[in-house]
Image (cartoon, rainbow, N blue to C red):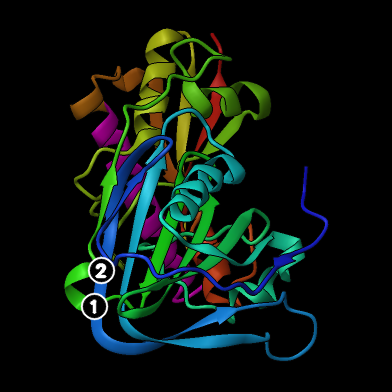
C-alpha cells in the first residue's frame, strides 16, 4: 500500500551518549560508498515537495555518508526501511520527517535532496522512501537520514549522519545471509521476470564509463540468470546491451555489443553456463526506457537485458 501523505513532527528528547551505530540489515548488505568530512552542512527536508524549494533545515557538523546494495528475498522498500528505522529509533533518534515516492514529491523531491551519484546510490523515482531523525546527545544534536530504493534485483540504502564528533560517526553494518526466493525454484527474481515477461533487466551490473569491462564483483542478477539457465537447459537467452544517447550511434552500438559479450563471457567462465544457451547483441541507444535528457534517465538507459528467445 502506498503512503497517502508524509509524516512530519518536531520533538524534544533527553541527552543520549554519542557513539558508533550498528545496523542489522534485513538482507545481505554489500558496502558501496563511504564518504566523510570533518564539518559541513546537510539539508534535511521537513515537508514534501509542493511548489518551489522544499521546507527543511540545514544540519551542521561532521558528516558521514554511506551506501549499500542489499540482496536476498526480493525485499520491498518498506521491508528495507522499517527495520533500519526501528533500530535508529531504538538508538534515540526520533522522527523528523518520513515519506514515500509520490507522497514525497517524486522527481522534484529526489532532486532537491543530497543523494550519492550512480553507481554509489540508485534511486528508482517511482519506488523510494525517505526518513530523517534527530537525537540530543552530550555533545549536542545529531541528525540522521535514510534513503532506500530498489532495482529489479537489489535494494539500495544511503545513510547520512550529521553532528556527531568525527571519531564517533563510524557505522557498522551487520549483515545476514541472503533469504532464498520461493516462486520459481532455482531461478530467483531474474527467472521470474523471464517466465512472466520474456525479458529481464540485469540492473546491478557495473561497467566503467565508456568501457566494456565488467566489474569484478559478484552480481546477484548474473547468479539468478545462471541458476535459471541451469535449472532449464532447454531455455535460450539473448543478452542485449543498451547505452544512453551521448555520442554517435555506431560507436554506441559497438559498445553495447561489447558489454553484452562481456556478460556472456562471465556467465560461461565463472558460472559454467553452456555457451549454446546464450548469445549477445547490442542496439546502442535505439531502445531507451527513460528520457536521455536527465542524468537519472541516462543511467536507466545504460543496461544489459536478457531476452528469452527459445524454450526448445
Q: What is the x, y in percent for residue 114? A: 48, 78
Q: Residues within 10 Å of mark 2 (few under 14, many from 20)?
A: many
Tell me, yes or no, if residue 37 can be seen here: yes
- Residue on which the image places disc 1: 165
Q: Is residue 267 left or right of residue 147?
A: left
**Is residue 115 shown above or below 124?**
below
Q: What kind of secondary structure does the magenta stretch mostly adopt?
A: helix
Q: Is residue 251 on the magenta stretch?
A: yes
Residue sitting farthest toward the front:
14
Q: What is the x, y in percent for residue 103? A: 76, 63
Q: What is the x, y in percent for residue 237? A: 47, 26
Which residue: 52% across, 67% down? 133
**Which mark is on residue 169?**
2
Which residue: 29% across, 20% down? 273
Image quarter for residue 79?
A: top right
**Which mark is on residue 70?**
none
Numbered circles on residues, count: 2
Which residue: 42% across, 9% down? 231
Image quarter for residue 288?
A: bottom right
Q: What is the x, y in percent for residue 126? A: 68, 57
Inter-mark Cα distance, 1 to 2: 7 Å
Q: Is residue 283 left or right of residue 106?
A: left
**Is residue 28 shown above or below 156?**
above
- Say which element carries label 1: loop
Q: Which residues are magenta?
A: 244-267
Residue sitting farthest toward the right:
4
Q: Is residue 31 on the magenta stretch?
A: no
Q: Quick check: marks 1 and 2 in contact, CB under 8 Å?
A: yes
- Say which element carries label 2: loop
Residue nearer the viewer, 154 or 288 = 154
Which residue: 25% across, 63% down? 19
Amino acid at each position: 500500500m502506498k503512503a497517502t501523505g508524509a509524516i512530519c513532527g518536531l520533538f524534544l528528547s533527553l541527552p543520549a551518549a554519542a557513539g558508533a551505530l550498528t545496523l542489522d540489515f534485513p538482507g545481505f548488505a554489500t558496502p558501496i560508498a563511504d564518504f566523510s568530512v570533518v564539518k559541513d552542512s546537510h539539508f534535511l527536508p521537513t515537508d514534501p515537495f509542493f511548489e518551489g524549494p522544499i521546507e527543511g533545515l540545514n544540519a551542521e557538523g561532521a558528516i558521514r555518508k554511506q551506501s549499500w546494495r542489499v540482496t536476498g528475498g526480493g525485499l520491498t522498500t518498506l521491508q528495507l526501511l522499517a527495520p533500519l528505522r526501528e533500530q535508529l529509533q531504538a538508538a534515540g533518534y526520533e522522527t523528523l520527517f518520513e515519506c514515500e515516492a509520490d507522497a514525497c514529491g517524486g522527481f522534484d523531491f529526489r532532486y532537491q535532496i543530497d543523494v550519492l551519484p550512480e553507481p554509489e546510490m540508485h534511486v528508482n523515482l517511482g519506488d523510494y522512501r525517505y526518513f530523517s531523525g534527530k537525537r540530543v546527545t552530550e555533545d549536542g544534536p545529531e541528525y540522521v537520514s535514510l534513503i532506500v530504493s530498489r532495482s529489479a534485483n537489489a535494494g539500495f540504502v544511503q545513510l547520512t549522519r550529521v553532528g556527531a564528533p568525527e571519531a564517533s560517526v563510524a557505522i557498522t553494518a551487520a549483515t545476514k545471509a541472503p533469504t532464498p526466493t520461493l516462486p520459481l525454484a532455482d531461478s530467483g527474481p531474474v527467472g521470474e521476470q523471464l517466465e512472466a515477461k520474456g525479458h529481464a533487466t540485469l540492473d546491478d551490473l557495473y561497467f566503467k564509463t565508456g568501457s566494456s569491462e565488467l566489474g569484478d564483483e559478484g552480481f546477484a542478477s548474473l547468479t539468478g540468470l545462471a541458476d535459471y539457465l541451469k535449472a532449464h537447459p532447454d531455455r535460450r537467452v539473448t543478452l542485449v546491451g543498451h547505452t544512453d544517447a551521448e555520442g554517435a550511434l555506431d560507436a554506441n552500438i559497438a559498445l553495447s555489443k561489447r558489454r553484452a559479450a562481456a556478460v556472456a563471457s562471465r556467465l560461461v567462465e565463472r558460472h559454467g553456463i553452456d555457451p549454446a544457451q546464450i548469445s549477445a547483441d547490442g542496439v546502442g541507444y535505439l531502445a531507451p526506457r527513460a528520457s536521455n535528457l536527465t542524468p537519472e534517465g541516462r543511467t536507466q538507459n545504460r543496461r544489459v537485458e536478457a531476452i528469452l528467445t527459445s524454450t526448445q
